Amino acid sequence: MDSAMELIFQRTNKQIFRKGQEAIKLFNEEVSAADVLNEALNQARAQEAGLPVPRLHEVTKLDGRWAILSDFIEGETLLERIEAAPERLEEHLELFVRLQTRVHAARAPKLRQQKDKLNRRISASGLDATTRYELHVRLEAMPQHEKVCHGDFMPSNVILAADKAFIIDWAHVTQGNAAADAANTYVALLKCGREALAEAYLKLYCLRSDTALQYVRKWVPIVAGAHLARCQPEERAFYTAFCEGVAGEK
């Protein structure tokens, strides 16, 4: 490993390094080339759509592992700002929602379809056949949109640098229904144990986007069921709870 690379973040399947003015996302060996190349392509398409994305440099291999090289953004995450100044939560949430609705206003017609991805994930969720059927039916009944949906829009994926905000981690982006993306953010905040933040976010998102709260909530079992296809064993109970009773709803 290059001694000039400074480790700044680590997850189960990847590490983030800084080297000068570059950010290096280094993936573990089990991450496929297809997944890495798809993430880089997603980032490039988001950039071409005019969204505030760190500039992509290249995709390469380092010590036999795939890596994506991009601009390093000097700053702090929106999550760090929220935690450091809880009295400014309303201001920070306004920025968060404004950025998400900006993403939703963009178009990138070559991105994969959100419904296709959700249907595949629900099929592989491990839920019983009746619940899977009801989730598929609910998903197909939802309006088909072509909005850019980040897929993991969280305060930790927004970096604030001087007077500009950048959005990172475009591995899960699709084109589809913005309400599904909002439901995904809501579920993810709940999963992090931030119930108050999740409820405040959802209320503000619906207000600013003129979206019915009930409509976003109809997406919650769908996105939760989709997460079951790839979640950790200890996370299954959390996601499954959102899907319980779906078969009995009218």
Image: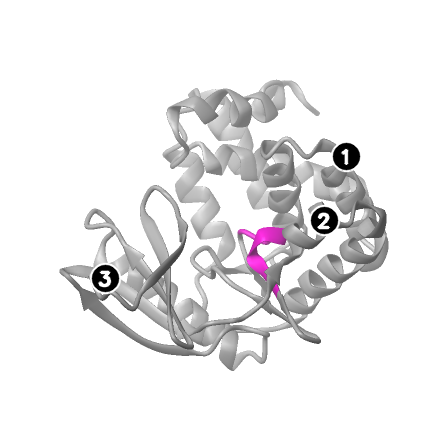
**Residue 42 sits in quarter:** bottom left
Tell me the CA gap for discs 1 and 3.
Answer: 38 Å
Viewer-nearest of labels 2 and 1? 2
Residue, x 53% and y 53% (percent of image)?
151
Name the residue carrying label 2. 84
Q: Which residues are magenta?
A: 152-159
Q: Say which amino acid is labelled 2.
A: Ala
Marks 3,2: beta carbons within 8 A:
no
Distance (Cα) linking label 2 and label 1:
16 Å
| Colour convention of the picture | one colour
Split into 4 quadrants, where in the image is the N terminus? bottom left
Residue 60 horizontal/vertical position (percent): 23, 71
In what element is the residue under mark 2? Answer: helix
Q: Pinpoint residue 98: horizontal percent, then vertical percent.
A: 75, 64
Q: Crowdedness of circle 1 by 10 Å Cα count: few (<14), some, many (20+)?
A: few
Mark earlier in primary sequence (1, 3): 3
Residue drawn at (63%, 36%), measured in percent from left and top? 220
Looking at the picture, how far across and down is residue 63, in whole percent?
15, 61
Q: Which residue is mark 3?
A: 66
Residue 156 magenta: yes
Query: Quick check: 64 left or right of 37?
Result: left
What is the tally of numbered marks visible in this picture? 3
Q: Which residue is mark 1?
A: 196
- Are the residues tagged 2 and 1 within 8 Å (C-beta)? no
Q: Nearer the viewer, mark 3 or mark 2?
A: 2
Q: Which is more N-terminal, label 2 or label 3?
A: 3
Is 91 on the left-hand or right-hand side of 141?
A: right
Amino acid type, residue under disc 3 in the picture: Trp
Separation of residues labelled 3 and 2 (CA atoms): 35 Å
What residue is drawn where x is 24% and y is 50%? 28
Q: Position of residue 206 (x, y in %)?
A: 80, 50
Mark 3 nearby-residue class (10 Å; few <14, some 14–19, many ≥20): many
